[in-house]
């Protein structure tokens, strides 16, 4: 084992209210699905031991409140995150359109060293619902992920346990990779920040 | 301006300038008093005692001649001769003829006095001079003169204090609605401080009578306050109001609870149902502000004390001794009378408290014995005796008011009987099964223990005996110590709902707002909004484990209550956690009851928790952290050391009243206490949780570990602890928690919480405001070349301009209209600000100040309409402003010139007409004079000449063209953008002006500290005085032109000569024009420039002349000033 690596990976799950963040977390950690979850107030977390690349690490998965106004409560626990999972409901186009602002908000609050390469994973949940109700096509979602720097994309069903394991495994893997990269970067004292600022401004300018 | 007639002495300080048989107009001699030193001392004394007088006054002589001691009444004061003359003219023209009929001089005087009194009182019906307190009016006047705040600003109060800045300056602090100002004048040094209340981040009281205000970067320190606490409270109150407004200013999205239909019609936004219901207290407009604030403060404390609706105000209060039949003790305390309630609170804490609505009172008897006593019989056999301990008169007054109120409520008594059928306590006493209630009646209650049934029964027995002992019930309940104990041991399920409703005060609201809940559904039912969408998502995620919520009945009830609230308060709409709280309320309460409890929670018990920015929750989190640090410093240090954010673990506790964290039966127990005792319970329990787990918590190193410790503790609350002491009984961990909460943290009172909330509110709102502005800035699509800080500053100024021009309650779109735009520009560019002292003096001495501010204002209007307001809807947003300013500032001379071109090109054809060209030169004149003084007049005049020459050339070209094509053209004059650029850039000065100077005039960072210090050296003062008397001479002239001519004469030739020389040097053509102008009458020239009917060459020349003449005259005025400066010392 290489030194300096922590054995705890912090993962934040973000997304609109009701897209299934709590269910995903519980499906992954406890392999259970329930219709009896309460709306998450503030934040909560569960931990799970996983084996990634022959290393045993603890994943601390933070589930958050989805309602927009909860953002103002301060999101102290974003800091030090190793990966962020952006979740939307494939049957709700608005929850997909909001991914942009969730991503921006996360980068702003968590203030990672290298925002361009921070590992995100996008999860389109509730694929178990009948196809006719679907509002966001796989193609559209993948195009978005492509545009935001090749974010890995998964379509899951927390209810039926489809693809959940795979999504979180990628999360764990990419978090570890991120750590290694950060170590590399840390040799250069702070060259990233300035870059990051201008690029954010640029991208904002181009989209309009 | 007219003042309330005030007796004055004949003083040698005043010199009479006009006189008739009743009135004298006088001028202060102060300026002419002998030595400079004496004058300075005099001014200091005036300042310290705040006796500063305007220099002119009119006195109504009431007794004899000038020699008698009581000379007469001052009826008017003025800052300038002009004003006093206007007043004088009114007296001579209107008042004296009115009084012709009166024979006797004394009669005339009396008539005049009453006339002026009524004049002043009607005129000042809505100003801060409303107070008849002469001192206050004098202060308001000096404050207005000194600080030049917007007209709408009103002085609340003023205090003597000293301000620390290297030295102590003794002076006056003026507190108005949005500003805190300080002024001192000590031995020739003037100190002015202006603090915007909305910028204040912290207000603290320091030891030994000092108050401190700190805003974003600067710290202000005031001391020597005689009434520190009063000052502090007032400042605190006003600052908090400013904060509330600030919060509204930056949340600009439409209210989430407004349906799409409502968002379209503005009218409906302004009258939300809550406002219609009268829950928003209207401030009493007939009183001076300070008094109004004090009354408001007292009332809100009263409402808080008795949990009354916010429309209740104290009408009377007296000291009484209260005895209740059924107890042997009597309680000393205070009896209050409000619009709907008779309230009593014992002096000793927790001994006796009651709020009796008038409609529940059956009989009132006045027992007249030695002491005056009132016997009151209310419903439920409640008999009360109140013995008045104060003055007899007071008691009489109280009883009369009581009689009036009782009569006013007779009609309501009819509603009492049906209302009581909704109170379980009635059923309970009658031995019936519960008729009405929440879901619990059908679906059962949640209980922790198996022996719950037995416990419930014995608890009910206690309550029944309390009710039977004639301590009233539901609306008439008297809170005695036994009551408090009975609540603390946990309410029985049958009574839980009723007690929550009663304790929180929601029951009163339900009674008074009868039918409102159903009306909400009738009026708004079926509408959808962002909030209703969010509610739908959460209905099944509220209390899914409770059987009632596995049925449509439960879900529908929950939906209806939450929908109703979003209709009721669209600005709050729906916030997650409300669903959880309401789902529990509904087990014990009917829909309507739960709705009213929810309104009390949002308005009073948890203020600001569920708003769009959840500011209340954030503030309470800060309060909680402060309490942890204060009561458990070791834990506090530990959290700091490991950067553990308590909010992660604790915010859900408060937001969901512990329902989300603790097993429900325990959360219910906490809610029992919370509804009875208020928000402090939440804090006490929170502190106790941390204290009990202290050892474990000291081992945690991050948020996650802390949450793990707490979670495992909450899972074991039912565990039984063996008592350690001798008589200790085994008790559950939960009971230990409640004991700890009450015993160890009894010092955590509601007052302390309210205080701490106020303290933290400033910082929290400021940081939220900053956050909101940052995200506004981030969302800009075009940022020109402004830095982030500059953009943030612009954004700040943008909202500031809006802040001062909109009323507190109104929500606004984040766009500025023209007046707001002007304010914004004035804040970032000095030339755009027209209320500096200099402008005022100009206006005073020379009427319209040669029209210069008018030109400037006109230019700004044009900028707004043609450059900034791109979609021509009369509004600009931040993006428009950034774009427009970017063009002016960051795109060099070309950008700035383009702005000029567009601003003046009225018809948007890309060419300037003759008038427009003249306007350009006027604007240039205005800007260069403001920025550079008068040294570059030549450049402007030469610009005009060149422009006309160029236009003439172009016109000639086009004329010949027109001739050849056989058309007659009226377009003899036009100046294209390219020509304008060429003409401007031909002049070195103008070239620099457009490429550098103009850009440098914008100040896009916080400039200075709000403190201005000026030192008045005696010679300068003398100069200004001689100038002043010069100004007087001008002012006596009637016509504006005549006045200017007189001014020119005063200038004693030298200035005029100098001006002539200079004009000669700069440009030959201008010289010729200037001399031509010199020979002609001014008034005629002005007419000529207005006349634009035809355009022959001669008139064209005349227009140039008139413009230049104006420039010359303007120059003459200031030239004269510098001329005088040279002459005087010699």
Image (cartoon, rainbow, N blue to C red):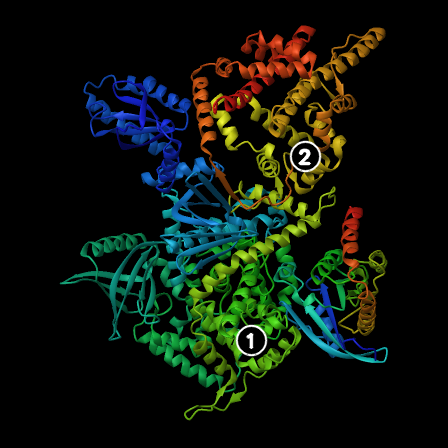
- What x and y, as percent, mark residue B545? 61, 75
B582 vs A78, nearest the viewer: A78
- Subunit under mark 2: B
Q: Is residue B992 above or below residue B205?
A: above
Q: Is residue B360 above or below residue B275?
A: below
Q: Are marks 2 and 1 on the same chain?
A: yes
Q: Residues within 10 Å of mark 2 (few under 14, many from 20)?
A: many
Q: Is residue B979 visible?
A: yes
Q: Is residue B566 visible?
A: no
Residue farthest to the front? B1130
> Separation of disc 2 and disc 1 at Cα?
55 Å
From the viewer's perspective, tell me whether residue B720 is left or right of residue A12: left
Residue that numbered label 1 is attached to: B635
Does label 2 or label 1 sit earlier along the sequence?
Answer: 1
Residue that numbered label 2 is attached to: B868
- Subunit under mark 1: B
- What x and y, as percent, mark residue B931? 62, 30
């Amino acid at each position: 084992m290489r030194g300096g690596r922590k054995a705890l990976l912090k993962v934040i799950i973000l997304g609109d209210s009701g897209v299934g963040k709590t269910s995903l977390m519980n499906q992954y950690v406890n392999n259970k699905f329930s219709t009896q979850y309460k709306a998450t107030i503030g934040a909560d977390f569960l931990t799970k031991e996983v084996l990634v690349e022959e290393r045993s690490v603890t994943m601390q998965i933070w589930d958050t409140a989805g309602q927009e106004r909860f953002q103002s409560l301060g999101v102290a626990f974003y800091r030090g995150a190793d990966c962020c999972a952006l979740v939307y409901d494939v049957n709700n186009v608005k929850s997909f359109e909001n991914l942009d602002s969730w991503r921006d908000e996360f980068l702003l609050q968590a203030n990672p060293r290298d925002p361009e390469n921070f590992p995100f994973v996008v999860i389109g949940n509730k694929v178990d619902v009948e196809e006719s109700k679907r509002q966001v096509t796989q193609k559209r979602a993948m195009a978005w992920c492509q545009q935001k720097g090749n974010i890995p994309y998964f379509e899951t069903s927390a209810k039926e346990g489809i693809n959940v394991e795979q999504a979180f495994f990628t999360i764990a893997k990419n978090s570890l990779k991120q750590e290694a990269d950060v170590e590399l970067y840390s040799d250069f004292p702070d060259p990233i920040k300035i870059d990051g600022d201008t690029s954010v401004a640029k991208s904002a300018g181009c989209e309009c | 301006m007219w003042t309330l007639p005030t007796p004055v002495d004949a003083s040698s300080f005043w010199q009479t300038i006009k006189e008739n048989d009743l009135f004298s107009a006088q001028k202060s001699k102060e300026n002419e008093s002998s030595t400079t030193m004496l004058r300075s001392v005099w001014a200091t004394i005036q300042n310290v005692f705040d006796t500063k007088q305007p220099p002119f006054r009119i006195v109504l002589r009431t007794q004899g001649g000038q020699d008698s001691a009581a000379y007469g009444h001052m009826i008017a004061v003025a800052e300038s001769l002009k004003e006093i003359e206007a007043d004088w003219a009114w007296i001579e023209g209107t008042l004296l003829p009115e009084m012709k009929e009166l024979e006797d001089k004394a009669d005339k005087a009396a008539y005049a006095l009453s006339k002026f009194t009524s004049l002043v009182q009607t005129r000042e019906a809505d100003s801060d001079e409303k107070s008849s307190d002469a001192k206050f009016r004098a202060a308001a006047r000096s404050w207005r003169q000194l600080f030049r705040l917007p007209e709408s600003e009103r002085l609340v109060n003023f205090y003597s204090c000293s301000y620390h800045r290297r030295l102590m300056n003794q002076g006056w602090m003026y507190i108005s609605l949005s500003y805190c100002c300080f002024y001192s004048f000590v031995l020739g040094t003037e100190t002015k401080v202006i603090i915007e209340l909305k910028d204040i981040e912290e207000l603290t009281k320091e030891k030994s009578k000092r108050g401190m205000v700190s805003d974003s970067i600067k710290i202000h320190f005031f001391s020597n306050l005689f009434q520190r606490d009063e000052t502090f409270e007032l400042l605190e109150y006003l600052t908090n109001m400013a904060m509330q407004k600030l919060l509204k200013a930056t949340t600009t999205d439409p209210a989430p609870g407004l349906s799409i239909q409502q968002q379209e019609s503005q009218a409906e936004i302004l009258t939300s149902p809550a406002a219609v219901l009268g829950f928003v207290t209207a401030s009493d407009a007939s009183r001076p502000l300070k008094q109004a604030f004090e009354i408001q403060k007292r009332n809100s404390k009263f409402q808080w004390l008795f949990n009354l609706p916010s429309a209740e105000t104290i009408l009377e209060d007296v000291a009484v001794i209260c005895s209740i039949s059924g107890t042997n003790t009597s309680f000393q305390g205070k009896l209050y009378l409000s619009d709907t309630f008779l309230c009593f609170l014992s002096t000793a804490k927790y001994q006796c408290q009651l709020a009796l609505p008038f409609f529940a009172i059956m009989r009132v008897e006045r027992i007249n014995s030695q002491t005056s006593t009132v016997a009151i019989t209310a419903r439920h056999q409640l008999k009360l005796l109140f013995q008045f301990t104060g003055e007899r008169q007071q008691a009489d007054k109280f009883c009369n008011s009581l009689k009036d109120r009782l009569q006013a409520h007779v009609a309501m008594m009819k509603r009492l009987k049906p209302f009581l059928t909704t109170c379980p306590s009635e059923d309970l006493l009658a031995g019936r099964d519960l008729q009405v209630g929440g879901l619990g009646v059908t679906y059962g209650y949640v209980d922790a223990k198996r022996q719950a049934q037995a416990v419930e029964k014995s608890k009910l027995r206690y309550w029944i005996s309390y009710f039977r002992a004639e301590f009233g019930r539901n609306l008439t309940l008297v809170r005695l110590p036994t009551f408090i104990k009975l609540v603390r041991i946990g309410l029985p399920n049958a009574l839980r709902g009723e007690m929550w409703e009663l304790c929180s005060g929601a029951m009163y609201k339900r009674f008074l707002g009868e039918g409102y809940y159903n009306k909400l559904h009738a009026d708004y039912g079926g509408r959808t909004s962002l909030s209703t969408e969010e509610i739908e998502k959460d209905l099944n995620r509220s209390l899914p484990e409770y059987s009632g919520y596995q049925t449509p009945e439960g879900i529908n009830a929950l939906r209806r209550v939450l929908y109703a609230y979003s209709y009721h308060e669209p600005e709050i709409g729906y916030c997650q956690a409300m669903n959880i709280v309401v789902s529990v309320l509904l087990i014990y309460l009917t829909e309507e009851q739960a709705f009213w409890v929810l309104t009390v929670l949002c308005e009073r018990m948890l203020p600001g928790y569920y708003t769009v920015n959840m500011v209340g929750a954030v503030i309470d989190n800060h309060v909680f952290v402060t309490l942890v640090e204060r009561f458990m410093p070791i834990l506090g240090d530990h959290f700091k050391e490991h950067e553990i954010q308590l909010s992660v673990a604790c915010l859900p506790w408060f937001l969901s009243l512990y329902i989300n964290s603790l097993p429900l039966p325990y959360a219910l127990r906490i809610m029992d206490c919370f509804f009875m005792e208020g928000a402090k319970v939440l804090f006490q329990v929170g502190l106790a949780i941390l204290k009990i787990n202290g050892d474990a918590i000291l081992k945690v190193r991050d948020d996650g570990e802390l949450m793990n410790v707490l979670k495992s503790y909450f899972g074991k609350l039912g565990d039984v602890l063996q008592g350690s002491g001798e008589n200790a009984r085994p008790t559950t961990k939960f009971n230990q928690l409640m004991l700890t909460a009450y015993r160890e943290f009894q010092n955590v009172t509601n007052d302390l919480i309210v205080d701490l909330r106020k303290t933290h509110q400033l910082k929290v709102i400021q940081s939220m405001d900053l956050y909101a502005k940052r995200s506004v800035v981030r969302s800009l699509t075009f940022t020109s070349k402004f830095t982030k800080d500059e953009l943030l500053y612009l954004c700040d100024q943008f909202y500031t301009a809006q802040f001062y021009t909109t009323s507190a309650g109104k929500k606004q779109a984040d766009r500025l209209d023209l007046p707001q735009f002007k304010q914004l520009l004035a804040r970032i560019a000095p030339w755009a600000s027209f209320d500096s002292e200099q402008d005022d003096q100009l206006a005073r001495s020379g009427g319209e100040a040669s029209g210069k501010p008018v030109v400037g204002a006109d230019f700004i209007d044009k900028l707004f309409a043609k450059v900034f307001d791109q979609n021509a809807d009369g509004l600009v947003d931040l993006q428009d402003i950034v774009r427009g300013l970017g063009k002016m500032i960051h795109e060099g001379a070309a950008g700035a010139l383009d702005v000029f071109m567009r601003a003046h090109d009225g018809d948007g054809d890309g060419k300037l007409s003759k008038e427009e060209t003249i306007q350009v030169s006027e604007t240039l004149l205005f800007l260069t004079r403001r920025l550079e003084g008068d040294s570059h007049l030549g450049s402007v005049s030469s610009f005009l000449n060149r422009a006309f020459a160029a236009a003439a050339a172009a016109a000639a070209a086009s004329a010949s063209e027109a001739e050849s094509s056989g058309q007659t053209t009226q377009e003899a004059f036009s100046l294209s953008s390219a020509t304008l650029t060429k003409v401007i850039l031909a002049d070195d000065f103008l070239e620099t002006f457009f490429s550098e100077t103009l850009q440098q005039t914008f100040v896009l960072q916080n400039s200075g500290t709000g403190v201005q210090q000026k030192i008045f050296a005696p010679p300068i003062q003398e100069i200004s005085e001689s100038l002043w008397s010069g100004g007087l001479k001008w002012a006596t002239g009637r016509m504006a032109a005549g006045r200017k001519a007189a001014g020119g004469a005063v200038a004693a030739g030298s200035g005029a000569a100098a001006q002539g020389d200079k004009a000669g040097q700069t440009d030959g053509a201008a010289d010729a024009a200037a001399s031509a102008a010199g020979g002609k009458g001014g008034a005629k020239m002005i007419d000529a420039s207005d006349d634009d009917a035809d355009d022959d060459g001669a008139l064209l020349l005349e227009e140039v002349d008139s413009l230049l003449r104006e420039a010359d005259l303007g120059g003459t005025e200031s030239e004269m000033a510098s001329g005088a400066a040279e002459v005087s010392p010699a």
